[in-house]
Image (cartoon, grey):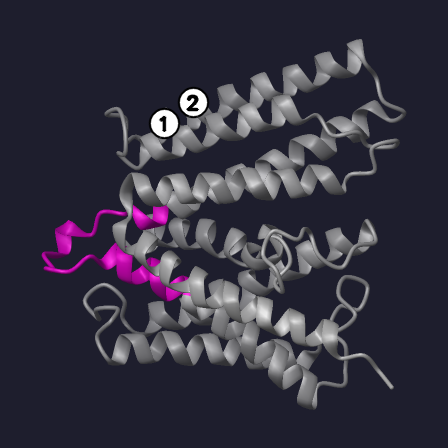
Amino acid sequence: MPDSTGKKDTVKARMLVNLLGIPALLVIIWLGGVAYAVFVSALVILGLREYLALLPKGELPPRPLPAYLAAAALLAAFARHAGLWGDSQQWDALGLTFFAIVFVLLLALQSVEVVRPSAAPWTTLSTNLVGVLWLAGFGGSFILVRSVDFSSFGLPISVAYRLTLALYVSVWVCDSAAYLMGRRFGKRKLFPQASPNKTVVGSVSGLVAATVLMLLLGLFGWLPGTIFPPTYLLALGVIIIGGFGQLGDFVESRFKRDFGVKDSGRLLPGHGGVLDRFDSLLYVMPVTYLFLELIVLS
C-alpha cells in the first residue's frame, strides 16, 4: 500500500507557503520602490546561489565571489536607472554601466581560470557568466517594470503597480491552467527533451488563460484602456506571458534536466527553489519592459 504521508506533508507545506508568502508578496509589490528592489535583489541572489550549487563542481566549478559581486552591481545599476538612488535615468548611462560590469566580470572570471584553472576553463567561464547575466541581467527588469513612469497619461492610479501585479497573477494563472489541462487532457508532448511532462494542450491552455485574464483586467478597468487597448493586452497575453513566459519555464526545465535534478532548490517547501517559482517571470519582465519603452510609451 503506497505511503501518502510524504504527499500530505508536501501539500501542507505548499499551503503554508501560499498562506504566508502571497500576502507578503502583494504588500511588497504595492510598496514598490526600495522595498521591492530589495525583495527582487534577494530573489536574484538566492536564484544565483541555486544556479551555482547545481553546477558539477568537478567539471564546471562555480565562481561565487565574482558572480555575487557582479550580480549586486547589476542590480544597483538597474535600481539607479529606475530612480531609486542617484540621479541617472538615461539609457546610455545604464548601458555604459552594464558594459563596465560585464567587462569586469569577464576579466575576473578569466583571471580565476588563469590562477586556478578548471578542467574546461572556457566552458566554466561561460557557464558562470551566463548565470549572472540570466539572473541579474533579466532579474533587474523586475525593478524597471515596477518603476515605469506613466504620469504623462494623467491617471490618478499607480499603473506600474497594477501592471506588475497583473504580470505576476497572469503568469501563475498560465502555469496553473497549463498544469491542470495538460494533466487532464494532454497527450502529445511539446518539448520532451526539455520537459517530459508538458503537453501541447497544456501550453495552449496556459496561453489562452493568460490572454483571457489580461483582456478581463482591461475590460474591468484594472489596466486602463487609455494605456492598454485590446491589441496591447493581446500582445501581453499571447506573446509575452503565454509565449515568453512558457519559454522561461522550458529553459529552466532543460537546465534542471541537464543536471539531473527535479527542483532547483528547497527554499520554498512544496514549491522547490526560487528558480522554480520565478523562471517564467525572468522572461516576462524584460520583454514587458522593452514593450513598454518601445511601443506603449514611445
Q: Mark 2 points at which residue?
A: 96
Please tell me the numbered disc located at residue 92. Answer: 1
Which residue does the image show at 47% across and 30% down from the upper left?
74
Whether residue 291 is visible here, answered yes or no, is yes
Q: Which of 68 and 157 lies nearest the eye of the viewer?
A: 68
Name the image quarter holding residue 127: top right
Residue in the image at 55% along x and 60% along y: 244
Q: Quadrant of residue 55?
A: top right
- Residue 209 shown in magenta: no
Q: Is mark 1 on a helix, strand or loop?
A: helix
Amino acid on which the number 2 mark rests in the picture? Leu
Q: Which residue is drawn at 60% across and 51% down?
A: 267
Q: Residue at x 73, y 31 (%)?
A: 126
Q: Position of residue 146 (x, y in %)?
A: 32, 50
Q: Which region is colored magenta?
A: 144-168
Residue 110 figure quarter: top right
**Spatial distance from mark 1 to mark 2, Cα to Cα?**
6 Å
The quadrant of the rendering that contains the N terminus is: bottom right
Describe residue 58's horizontal placement relative to residue 152 as left or right. right
- Residue 206 at x, y = what percent? 55, 76
